[in-house]
Image (tube, rainbow, N blue to C red):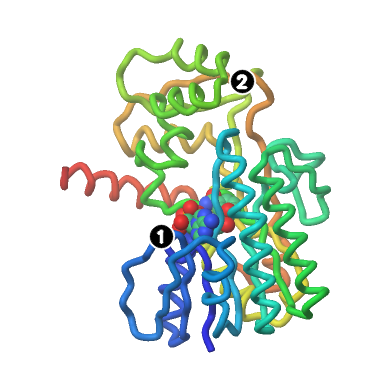
Amino acid sequence: MAILVTGSAGRIGSRVVDLLLAAGHAVTGFDLRGSGRREAGYREIVGAFDDREAAREAVKDARQILHLGAFMSWLACDADKLFRANVDGTRVLLEEAAKVRAGRIVFASSGEVYPENVPDYLPVDEDHPLKPRSAYGLSKQVGEEIVRFTERSAGIPATILRFSHTQDASELLDETSFFSGPRFFLHPKIRQQEGFGNAMAVAALKAIDDGVPALVLSRNESGRPFRMHITDTRDMVEGILLALESEKAAGRTYNLGATAPVDFAQALPAMARATGLPLKTVDLPGSGVFYETSNARIRAELGFAPQWTIERMIAEAAAARAARAKAA
Ligand code: NAD
């Protein structure tokens, strides 16, 4: 019997597979992309979650299922693909899991189910109403319902983890990164906002652009700097494995992420010092990003103890950036 890890070629899933294999578990990976792994004890299914044949093959020896794979996009043109992957994919996978009577499900949900960017109150805890504003958040909310339905109807105990924003530290200071480029770097942010069609944000960003590559400190329209959780992948993996291994986690829902949110007014100057890049400040239209999410439940119940502060992540990111520059 094996542990099935979906999203096994992804940022978080691939690290989970590393640790499970190192601990001597048999692992099945399931992802659209091949991982290139050849280790003993590893079997891989390359396919889509909503492809029933592939899902059947993936669950066939699954004792436990870590459903960590999903499609992440906030572009309107990706909505069909998003719901196929995250909703139909989760349904088909868990229907097949029910047939083989898998023993356990751990599901990667997201803080976008609340959503954290427009909270009713802070800090956001697990009792906060679920009122997603993005198609991605909605796809995760429906995914949670499918997980709980499978738990009730097939008797498979399940744990839902509502993930914080998560990155490898090495991505933080990489302007080509899907997440960090638009979040911290001026030119990728302009391109992202152009893609979203946010004309006012594009105008505000272009007004501070002198053509030189720069970091950007984002604030809202009243000048309040952005604040959000950014959790290192290694801490997330620790939380996922705690949820997998703990009997107490069965039937439970947890926020999983760093304890303290990142204040951009402190992090961006530190990033500028670490890179030598100029730092620009922009006030973007709207209320901006400003939240804090409580991880108190998973710390108290499962002993989750995240290790990676933003300061440690920035130090590692700077070293990774220097290594990339040397190799180029
Ligand atoms: P990732 O994009 O690195 O990995 C996701 C993997 O899922 C990819 O390898 C991709 O190929 C695979 N995948 C996508 N659609 C698929 C499909 N239809 N069939 C098969 N495989 C498919 O993402 P990650 O950062 O490792 O995130 C892992 C999980 O955590 C996802 O469920 C994501 O929604 C959730 N999450 C991530 C963050 C974050 O900030 N990284 C935040 C909240 C929740």
> Left of 242 or right of it: where is 123?
right
Q: Residue at x 52, y 14 (%)?
A: 204
Taking 57 as reference, is 194 above or below it? above
Q: Residue at x 34, y 85 (%)?
A: 40
Taking 65 as reference, is 116 above or below it? above
Q: Residue at x 74, y 42 (%)?
A: 132
Asked which quadrant contains residue 150, the reply is bottom right
Does the beta carbon at disc 1 come under 8 Å from ligand 1?
Answer: yes
Residue 70 image point, x, y percent: 56, 55
Task: Please state which amino acid type lies under the numbered disc 2.
Answer: Gly
Residue 237 image point, x, y percent: 52, 66
| Front label number (1 vs 2) | 1
Say which element carries label 2: loop
Task: Please state which amino acid type lies under the numbered disc 1.
Answer: Arg
Few, some or many residues within 10 Å of mark 2 (<14, 14–19, 20+): some
Q: Which residue is mark 2?
A: 223
Q: Which residue is mark 1?
A: 33
For the question of whether residue 39 can be seen, the reply is: yes
Few, some or many residues within 10 Å of mark 1 (<14, 14–19, 20+): some
Residue 27 image point, x, y percent: 47, 80
> Left of 72 or right of it: where is 298?
right
Camera-side residue of 173 and 104: 104
